[in-house]
Image (cartoon, helix red, strand yellow):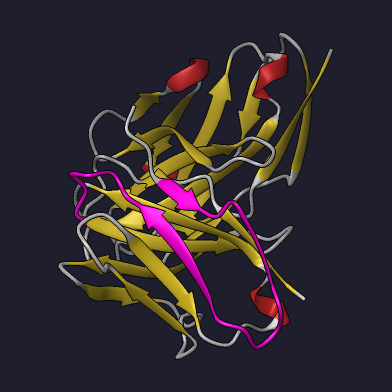
Amino acid sequence: EPEVTQTPSHQVTQMGQEVILRCVPISNHLYFYWYRQILGQKVEFLVSFYNNEISEKSEIFDDQFSVERPDGSNFTLKIRSTKLEDSAMYFCASSQDSGSSYGYTFGSGTRLTVV
Amino acid sequence: AQSVTQLGSHVSVSEGALVLLRCNYSSSVPPYLFWYVQYPNQGLQLLLKYTSAATLVKGINGFEAEFKKSETSFHLTKPSAHMSDAAEYFCAVTSTTGRRALTFGSGTRLQVQP
C-alpha cells in the first residue's frame, strides 16, 4: 500500500526559530496538502498545492508559512518564525485528483512543539 | 461554505454492540464525504468515502455509512464493535466543485468496553 511519509515525527523548536516539515507524497499523486491539528481540536486545512503553485489556502496560512516542492518527490512546509500557538500535529496529504473521488492519503504527522 | 457536525465527542459501547457515530454536514453544492480513523499517535486512515455513487458505502474493518441527502447525514455504523475499534473518528466533507480542501468535524472518540 503506497504511503505518504513525513519527517521528522517529532520536532521541538524554540519560539522565533524557523522549522521545515518534510513530506514525500505518493508518487503518482498530483495534489498535495498540509493540515494541522492542535491538541484536542479538529483537523484544520492549511494549504493545497498543484502544478507547483498554491491552489488554495486557509486564513491560518499567513505570511509565516510557505510551501515548496523542491524536487520531484518532496513537499515541504516552512514556518519562518515559530510561535507558541504553532504547536500542533501537522499532517501532509496527497490525492490523485482534485475532486478527491479517490480519497486523500494522509501521512502519520509531525508533532511540532514550540517552547 | 461547508461544515461538519459530529454529535457526541465521546461514545462508549460494549464489545459486540452496535457502533453508531453521527455526522451531519452542510454544503451548498453536492458533497463528497469521508470518514477517517485516527489511532493513538498515528495519522489519519481512510475508512470509507461517498463520492456520489451508491448511497450505502462499505469501508474497511466492517464499517459502513449511508448518505442521506434529505437528512444531510452520513452516519458511520458497525454491527459489532471490537476492542481494536477504539480510536478517534473524523467525518469530513469536500465539495464536487470549487473548494476541494477537506473540512473536518471535531471528532468522536470511541471507547469499547470488554
Q: Quadrant of residue A98?
A: bottom left
Which quadrant does the C terminus of chain B fall into?
top right
Residue A25 to residue B17: above or below: below
Q: In this view, does A36 lie to the left or right of A65?
A: right
Which quadrant does the N terminus of chain B fall into?
bottom left
Q: Nearer the viewer, residue A17 or B62?
A: A17
Q: In this view, does B42 lie to the left or right of A98?
A: right
Q: Is residue B91 left or right of residue B56?
A: right
| Location of residue B58 in the rendering, given as x and y in whole percent from the top left corner | 39, 21
Is residue A8 visible to us here?
Answer: yes
Q: Which of B53 and A88 is in front in this view?
A: A88
Q: Nearer the viewer, residue B9 or B83?
A: B83
Residue B14 to residue B88: above or below: above
Q: Which of A60 and B91 is in front in this view?
A: A60
Is residue B26 visible to us here?
Answer: no
| Residue drawn at 22 percent across, 52 percent down | A99
Q: Quadrant of residue B13?
A: top right
Specify the segment rendered in magenta: A5-30
Q: Residue B110: within the magenta?
A: no
Residue A7 to residue A1: above or below: below
Q: Residue furthest left?
A: A51
